[in-house]
Amino acid sequence: MTVPLIDGAILARAREWVRLLASGDADAADIAALKDWLGERPEHARAFERERGFWQDLEPHRSLFAPRAIPATRAHGRAPHRLRRPSRRFVAGAVAASLLLAVTGTDILVRLQADHVTDRGEVRSVRLSDRSTAMLDANSAIAVHYSNTERRIDLLRGRVWFDVAHDDARPFRVAAGSGVIEDVGTAFEVTEGHTTQVAVSQGAVRLLGNDEPSAVTLTAGQRADLAGGIVSSLPAVLPGRIAAWRHGELLIDDMPLNQAIALAGHYRPGLTLVWADLSAKPHVSGAFKIAQADEAVIAMATNAGVNVAHLPGAMILY
């Protein structure tokens, strides 16, 4: 099969869109205009994916931007070497890495699908048309699909706590990962990541995986994991600990360091770039204030012997 060539002018326009989105200057009007442009012709969407893919192909080479570690050893009685100020080349490399992270992944595509989105460091409550409440954690996104027969929310990214209005006969469902969560009369949290996790703070939900023959019912304090269409129980917790982020608290309980850093990093307005191998580091536990996310990341990193460098708009762990 021969793939038709894309006109050079369309490719140039697609490149401009990628640059605008990567710059961080795009606003809601720009996103709406991009949606319109992508829908005008199939070639537009193909050109956009090609240009975005160009940046994505560069991502594996980000190690070229990593700073070289400076040993803190004494030589001939002299004081230990100090961490040198990042060079201009290092700063340029970090900016390039930040650019790559801004245009790769699913962020742009998620924003094109979503009705409600939160950025890093932003927690926001959304009042839905049926008077239900969806509280979006930082770096989360949902799409709302209400019809005459059901109220469905697609969780596209992150985690959301729902407080469902029950004076509506239509079932309330959340589609996430490889399953569906149906409200029975409750408030509950859904987290979308490597797997989908559900935790009930009040009432009950029915959780149905794509490969499950029947629904699993969860009540207050109960949690479950949904992976590959299969539902697995998780240890129960006190209902008051569920979605503690709604109250400005970040609770980390025996979590791998890389996951804990990523979680705390969601509450920072800037990027958190991890260039260190955290896989062999011990698990961490603790309670932090979301407003002090920077301090939480620094504390976890330094306690694990990981270096931290600061640049405008980014914190780098190496």
Image: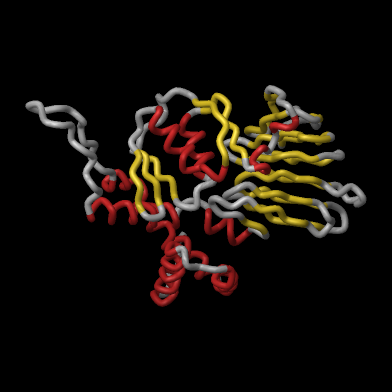
What's the image's color scheme?
A: secondary structure
Q: Is residue 270 above or below residue 284?
A: below
- Outermost residue toward the left? 76
Task: In this rendered view, identify the residue nearer to me: 18 or 12.
Answer: 18
Task: In this rendered view, identify the residue nearer to me: 150 or 73.
Answer: 73
Task: In this rendered view, identify the residue nearer to me: 302 or 147.
Answer: 302
On the rendered structure, is 220 left or right of 158? right
Residue at image coords 53%, 39%? 263
On the rendered structure, is 120 left or right of 113? left
**Image coordinates for residue 175, horizontal then vertical, percent:** 72, 45
Q: Is residue 61 above or below residue 32?
A: above
- Outermost residue toward the bottom? 9
Residue at image coords 25%, 51%? 90
Residue at image coords 51%, 70%? 44
Q: Hey, which quadrant is residue 244 in on the image?
A: top right
Task: In this rendered view, identify the residue nearer to me: 107 or 278.
Answer: 278
**Image coordinates for residue 120, horizontal then vertical, percent:** 53, 51
Instruction: Specify the quadrant that holds the C terminus.
Output: top left
